[in-house]
Amino acid sequence: MAKKSQKLTRQKLKDQETVSPSQFNFLKSSFLGTVLVILSGIVLYTDKIIGFLDINFSLPSRYDSYDFETLIWSISVTVSPLLLIIAAHLKTKLIAYVVPLYSYTLQLWFIIYDLNIVDKQYTYFYALGTCILIIFVWTAYNKKEKESITREIEKKKRVLSENEL
């Protein structure tokens, strides 16, 4: 009798495993990719954040023609696509691409339709839209992960019920 209960206990403990190491690595890389995609959209507003916080540094003489915010914007426009490229290789959730799409669309809109040289008056609009999109992406990401876990649990239940027969 004792051997049978030990066998059943081991079976139960084995069945309680829900995520294998390879699945866990997939979830980590997917999460990291999603964060990088969102960050690639937020990076485009670094110059506005720096201007809002009134952060300023003296620049080397080779950058005399730039003000600090313009230099930061130039760097962020270069870094953002690089983050997108890295994230694309990490099984990123597609919904996360909404944030950089929003950011680039706003910048394109500003370039095409606005006559102002500096777009500081739009900072609140940028911040509000980006926050709403991040909340949307976070909610959608959690929903997708929950569905994935639920599917995995149902799959394990089916395997367990087939083994009992």
Image (tube, grey):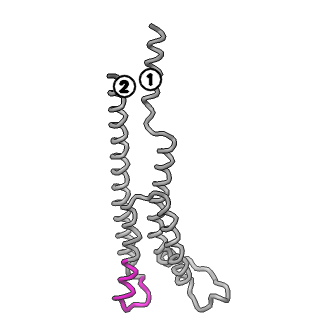
Q: Nearer the viewer, residue 64 or 151?
A: 151
The rendered magenta stretch, by its main secondary structure, is classed as: helix
The amino acid type of the residue labelled 1 equals: Gln
Residue topped by disc 1: 11
Q: In the image, residue 141 lies at what x, y percent? A: 37, 54
Q: Work out whether mark 2 precedes mark 1 in sequence or the reverse, and give the earlier one.
A: 1
Q: In the image, residue 134 lies at what x, y percent? A: 38, 62
| Residue 81 to residue 5: above or below | below
Q: Is residue 153 magenta?
A: no
| Residue 150 to residue 134: above or below | above
Q: Nearer the viewer, residue 46 or 84?
A: 84
User: Which residues are drawn in magenta?
Assistant: 105-119
Q: Is residue 108 magenta?
A: yes
| Left or right of residue 63: residue 22 | left
Please tell me which residue is depicted at 48% across the width and 15% down the height of the picture: 6
Q: In the image, residue 49 lies at what x, y percent? A: 48, 74
Residue 159, quarter of the rendered image: top left
User: Which secondary structure lies at badge 2?
Assistant: helix
The amino acid type of the residue labelled 2 equals: Asn
Q: Residues within 10 Å of mark 2 (few under 14, many from 20)?
A: few
Q: Identify the image quadrant of the C terminus.
A: top left
Residue 37, quarter of the rendered image: bottom left
**Residue that lies at the very extreme toward the right in this rendered image:** 61
Q: Looking at the image, is mark 2 or mark 1 nearer the viewer?
A: 2
Q: Nearer the viewer, residue 17 or 108?
A: 17
Please tell me which residue is depicted at 38% across the width and 57% down the height of the picture: 138
| Residue 113 to residue 32: above or below | below
Query: How far is disc 2 from disc 1 in space, using C-alphas?
Result: 11 Å
Badge number at residue 163: 2
User: Which secondary structure lies at badge 1?
Assistant: helix
Residue 99, quarter of the rendered image: bottom left
Please tell me which residue is depicted at 39% across the width and 62% down the height of the picture: 96
